[in-house]
């Protein structure tokens, strides 16, 4: 069996009049993330980690914001499902995901199991293979000033 790992990172600005989506789950919050798609930083970081592990470039390469309306306001769960299909073309499947969201607010702790369930279902893997963590930056930087949210992800992929 061959295994590979990939690292993903994403950041989006918090703005008024947008819904806030994290890990495929909608959060009630006074601001949402700005982006061409639904701007789900957690899913975007996971997609980049998976694509990196399979040596298939990044999310912007496969789902560019320059393709007119094709990906505008798209649900990032669709992008994640397509990413799973893309890595499968090279014979890879997801081993596990470990990801961290950096945000002062909203607090995510209570919703992490819901995020894990959602992501596991989209990726077709066991919920035990999806680790999600949340942290703050102790009021430092753009995250601490609540100007944006970032996410980091590591993915392990396997092929026989």
Image (tube, helix red, strand yellow):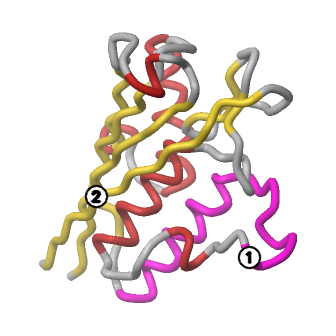
Please name whichever residue, 131 or 99, is drawn nearer the observer in this view of the structure: 99
At label 2, counting other C-alpha atoms closer than 10 Å, the crowd grade (few under 14, some 14-19, many 20 or more) is many
Horizontally, is 65 left or right of 101 in the view? right
Label 1 sits on a secondary structure element that is loop
Q: Which residue is mark 2?
A: 7
15 versus 41 height, above or below: above
Q: Which residue is mark 1?
A: 66
Is residue 74 on the magenta stretch?
yes
Label 2 sits on a secondary structure element that is strand
89 versus 50 height, above or below: below
Q: Name the residue located 45 percent from the left edge and 88 percent from the top edge.
A: 89
Figure quadrant of residue 15:
top right
19 versus 151 height, above or below: above
Q: Name the residue located 80 percent from the left edge and 26 percent from the top edge.
A: 16
Look at the image and give the residue range highlighted in magenta.
Answer: 66-90
Please name whichever residue, 17 or 153, is drawn nearer the observer in this view of the structure: 17
């Amino acid at each position: 069996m061959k295994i590979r790992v990939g690292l993903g990172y994403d950041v989006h600005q918090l703005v008024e009049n947008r819904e806030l989506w994290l890990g495929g789950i909608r959060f009630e919050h006074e601001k949402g993330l700005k982006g061409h798609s639904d701007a789900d930083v957690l899913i975007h970081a996971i997609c980049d980690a998976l694509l990196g592990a399979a040596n298939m470039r990044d999310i912007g390469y496969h789902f560019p914001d320059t393709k007119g309306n094709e990906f505008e306001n798209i649900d990032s769960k669709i992008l994640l499902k397509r990413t799973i299909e893309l890595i499968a073309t090279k014979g890879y499947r997801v081993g596990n995901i470990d990801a961290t969201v950096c945000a002062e607010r909203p607090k995510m702790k209570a919703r992490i199991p819901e995020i894990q369930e959602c992501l596991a279902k989209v990726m077709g893997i066991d919920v035990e293979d999806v680790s999600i963590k949340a942290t703050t930056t102790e009021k430092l930087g753009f995250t601490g000033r609540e100007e944006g949210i970032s996410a980091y992800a590591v993915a392990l992929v396997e092929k026989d």
